[in-house]
Amino acid sequence: MTCQSDGVSQPGEQRYRHLFENMPICIFVADLTVTPAVILEVNRRAELVYGYTAAELVGNPATHLVPEESRASIRNISRRVRRGETVTAETTNRRRDGTTFPVRVIARLDPTNRGHMIATVEDITAERQRRSEAEAIDAERLRIAHEIHDGVAQSLGGLRFKSALWGHLGDSAPPGMRAALVELQDVLHAAIADMRRAIFALRPADLDAQGLFLALTQLVADFGDRNQLTARLEVTGPLDSLSASYELPLFRIIQHGLHNIGRHACASSVLVHLTVDPAGGVALSLGDNGCGFDPNLAGAAHHSGHFGLRHMRERILHLGGTLDIHSAISRGTELLITLPAAAIGISHAAG
């Protein structure tokens, strides 16, 4: 594929070749004019990951690296790329030694040759493990929330009902007893409110009952009321294109961001803007007019007030997204978050 001019490689081609060979992700170029697509080129990373030399792979069908049960997905990717689509999908590949592993494939037409497909392939074994752990954590949170709701919360509700009854029956009781019953009512009321907040923190019931956007509306409104500030939510784009796998992670990211604002920003107004694109990608902004901070100190060990941002960034990175922080002292803060379109088969249950 190297271009030659009087026996000398052109500088642009040399740079391309260097990047192609040294990218830390597997890259394949395949011929789409035949079915199944045939491998034309691979880079060094692909040789290391799959255990074949480039010479052994070139000329073989792309399905050569895929177990039988996943070959239909590879053929589907090739068909969609032939139609001009850029395809992101998850499937299973196979190494030379026969072991299989999960991968994320991003494939598109070669802009210099529409008969060729360029595909990047990423081993997502570690990511799948994180997802499994996150799903287990979320399932445990849901179990605990149900136990609290069906156990302690119900018992407290029963006690509050009985204490109200005792209060009516105790009209002729000594003043001290009536005061104690009123105090008991207040304590039970506060305990039940705390319990509801704990249940909501474990698993937002509104998310299950109302869906993401109504739940977010309630979350932002409650945050504004609780912190005595103006809080607005704006949502744009084709909302039905958002993957269900993003709903709980997005809710948690916004919940965490608002919590940080409430603790640190000293703001009087907050704007949460969520945009969903037609492919299902997400752009999220959380902005406030508070005291701001120096983003360069956000990760410093002594700047403990912003450990929350580090945890938020880790959650976003696990989803394949990005977090940018725009802030300055006395000039407020804006968090800009992007999440890619959820690939086929992704189940991000990061709670």
Image (tube, helix red, strand yellow):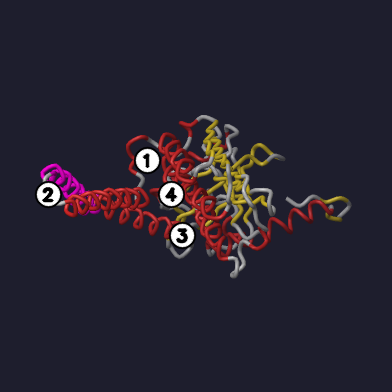
The residue lying furthest to the bottom in this view is: 302
Q: Secondary structure at mark 2?
A: loop
What number is the disc on residue 348? 4
Q: Nearer the viewer, residue 341 or 138?
A: 138
The amino acid marked with disc number 4 is: His
Residue 125 lies within the magenta run:
no
Sequence-first disc among 1 and 3 = 3
The amino acid marked with disc number 2 is: Ala
Are discs 4 and 2 less than 8 Å apart at CB? no
Please report the residue visible at 56 percent of the width from the left and 55 percent of the height from the top. 264
Q: Nearer the viewer, residue 19 or 326?
A: 326
Are discs 1 and 2 less than 8 Å apart at CB? no
Sequence-first disc among 3 and 2 = 3
Q: Nearer the viewer, mark 4 or mark 2?
A: 2
Are discs 3 and 2 less than 8 Å apart at CB? no
Q: Nearer the viewer, mark 1 or mark 4?
A: 1
Q: What's the distance in space between the residues labelled 1 and 2, CA to CA?
A: 46 Å
- Magenta segment main secondary structure: helix
Crowd rating for badge 4 (residues with CA inside 10 Å; few <14, some 14–19, many 20+): many
Q: Nearer the viewer, mark 1 or mark 3?
A: 1
- Residue 24, image x, y percentages: 63, 60
Please report the residue visible at 35 percent of the width from the left and 48 percent of the height from the top. 200
Q: Nearer the viewer, residue 339 or 166?
A: 166
Residue identifier under label 2:
173
Are discs 3 and 4 less than 8 Å apart at CB? no
What number is the disc on residue 125? 3
Q: Which residues are magenta?
A: 147-171
Please report the residue visible at 66 percent of the width from the left and 37 percent of the height from the top. 114
Residue identifier under label 1:
207
